[in-house]
Image: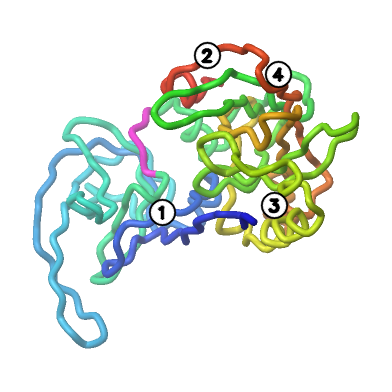
């Protein structure tokens, strides 16, 4: 009997000094803006490596940091005067963000121990320009969607047997006018059903990267499905969510739970406004299902790159 095999990580926006790099979900831009101490678009002028000393539990500790100085172009939050200096790790597991002199970045930074502004790969910091979608959203100038609002869809992209992955890739497309949130830890927590005697029957998902070797009887047993569902419903969605921007598509991988019966996967989801109003993803009655996958029916073959590239909006 398999449990829900999910590795949860906690999101530490400020990447605490004593912990190795471990990133969790990044909140959407406006929520990240609320949580940050300084957010700005700026050009890197210089990068210096320095050792810093901070007191942790009354004991002095030394760390190496890169101090990156920016000329700000747009300041969304924080000091608007003069150059802004932000520290980051040097790399090698300390969550350091790699900046390049002369390039422009949208930086989300946080005050860490020692009083320095700090950013990392666990934040929304990214190379950017004035007209990026995220800049426009932070400025409240994001264009309204032109297409008619429709429910999200799951469509088949193709089959992959490359780089250890043996299964199918689906396109999860958000056709709503706001973001949709779903459970998406490392991998994704989807629902699975088998078509048995012309009826869709809940089964235990296969979260591996190769077809399941368990018997159909095992994965559809009411006891095993109930145990899996209990684990799934107890996943803290605030620590394990993913989201899709309106109009965007993300790839989702799934290994066959059965080599005998047709099967499909589904995602429970909530809207962004619902999520931040307290709606729990696992209690949502909104579910998007993939088309049925029939074993041994030929479909498009994908390379690893084809399978996991994210489609542009």
Badge 1 density bin: few <14, some 14–19, many ≥20, Cα 10 Å: some
Magenta range: 125-129
Measured in 3D between alpha carbons, the distance from the residue under mark 4 to the one under mark 1, in whole angstroms, is 34 Å
- Earlier in the chain: of badge 3 and badge 1, it is 1
Which residue is the site of mark 4?
146
Which residue is the site of mark 2?
301
- Nearer to us of marks 4 and 1 is 1
* Tally of marks: 4
Q: In what quadrant of the picture does the C terminus appear? A: top right
- Nearer to us of marks 3 and 1 is 1
The reply to whether callout 3 and callout 1 are in contact (CB within 8 Å) is no
Where residue 30 appears, as percent x and y from the top left, is: 54, 47
Q: Magenta span: helix, strand or loop, mainly? A: loop
**Residue at 62% of width from left, 25% of height from top?**
171
Locate residue 68 relative to residue 279 in the image: left or right: left
Which residue is the site of mark 1?
23
**Residue at 37% of width from left, 39% of height from top?**
74
- Earlier in the chain: of badge 2 and badge 1, it is 1
Locate residue 274 relative to residue 60 in the image: left or right: right
- Nearer to us of marks 3 and 2 is 2
- Earlier in the chain: of badge 3 and badge 2, it is 3
């Amino acid at each position: 009997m398999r449990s829900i095999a999910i590795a949860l990580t906690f999101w530490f926006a400020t990447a605490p000094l004593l912990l190795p790099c471990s990133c969790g979900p990044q909140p959407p831009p406006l929520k990240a803006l609320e949580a940050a101490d300084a957010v700005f678009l700026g050009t890197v002028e210089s990068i210096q490596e320095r050792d810093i000393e901070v007191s942790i539990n009354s004991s002095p500790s030394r760390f190496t940091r890169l101090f990156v100085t920016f000329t700000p172009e747009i300041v969304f939050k924080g000091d608007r005067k003069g150059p802004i200096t932000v520290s980051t790790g040097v790399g090698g597991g300390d969550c350091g963000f790699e900046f390049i002199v002369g390039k422009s970045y949208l930086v989300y930074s946080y005050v860490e121990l020692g009083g320095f502004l700090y950013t990392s790969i666990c934040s929304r910091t990214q190379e950017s320009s004035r007209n990026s979608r995220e800049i426009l959203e932070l400025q409240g100038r994001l264009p309204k969607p032109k297409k008619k609002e429709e429910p999200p869809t799951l469509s088949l992209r193709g089959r992959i047997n490359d780089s250890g992955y043996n299964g199918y890739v689906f396109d999860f497309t958000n056709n709503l006018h706001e973001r949709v949130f779903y459970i998406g830890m490392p991998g994704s927590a989807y629902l699975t059903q088998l078509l048995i005697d012309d009826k869709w029957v809940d089964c235990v998902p296969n979260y591996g990267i190769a077809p399941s070797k368990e018997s159909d009887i095992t994965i559809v047993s009411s006891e095993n499905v109930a145990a899996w569902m209990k684990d799934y419903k107890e996943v803290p969605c605030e620590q394990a969510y993913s989201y899709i921007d309106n109009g965007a598509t993300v790839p989702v991988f799934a290994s066959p739970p059965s080599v005998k019966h047709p099967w499909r996967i589904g995602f429970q989801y909530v809207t962004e406004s619902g999520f931040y109003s307290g709606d729990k993803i696992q209690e949502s009655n909104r579910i998007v299902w993939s088309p049925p996958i029939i074993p041994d029916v030929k479909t498009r073959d994908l390379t690893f790159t084809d399978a996991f590239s994210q489609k542009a909006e």
